[in-house]
Amino acid sequence: MMSSPSSSVPALHNGDRLTRPEFERRCAAMLDMGKAEIIEGTVYMPSPVPASGHGKPHAPLMT
């Protein structure tokens, strides 16, 4: 679960267009955010689905 950032710092969202300093400021405000990266000004955040929960439903379908 993600923490809510302080009221002066907007939350970080997948697809945001930011400068590197703004990205780092928002990351610092969201302590338990998880993984996020910025590539050419666009924020990318992976899905929060855990690997074990993702793979289990697929295994019976493959067999």
Image (cartoon, helix red, strand yellow):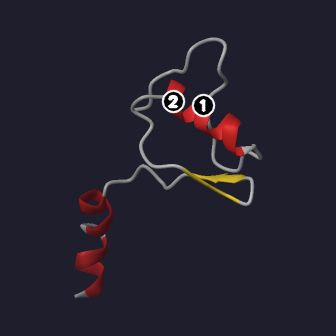
Q: Which residue is located at x 64 percent, y 39 percent?
A: 23
Quadrant location, the C terminus: bottom left
Residue type, mark 1 in image:
Arg
Tell which residue pokes out farthest to the front in this image: 21
Quadrant location, the N terminus: top left
The x and y percentages for residue 36 are 52, 49
Mark 1 surroundings: few (<14), some (14-19) or many (≥20) residues within 10 A? many
Give yes or no for contact between labels 2 and 1 (Cβ–Cβ under 8 Å).
yes
Kind of element beneath mark 1: helix
Left of 16 or right of it: where is 52? left
Kind of element beneath mark 2: helix
Residue 8 location, quadrant = top right
Mark 2 surroundings: few (<14), some (14-19) or many (≥20) residues within 10 A? few
The x and y percentages for residue 37 are 56, 53
Residue type, mark 2 in image:
Ala
Q: Which residue is located at x 24 percent, y 61 percent?
A: 52
Tell which residue pokes out farthest to the bottom in this image: 63
Left of 29 or right of it: where is 40? right
The x and y percentages for residue 39 are 66, 60
Left of 43 or right of it: where is 18? right
Nearer-the-camera pick, 27 or 11: 27
The residues bearing labels 2 and 1 have C-alpha atoms spaced at a distance of 5 Å
- Name the residue that disc number 2 marks: 28
Q: Which residue is located at x 33 percent, y 63 percent?
A: 54
Q: Which mark is residue 26?
A: 1
Q: Which residue is located at x 30 percent, y 61 percent?
A: 51
Left of 56 or right of it: where is 21? right
Query: Considering only vertical position in the picture, is 46 above or below 24?
Result: below
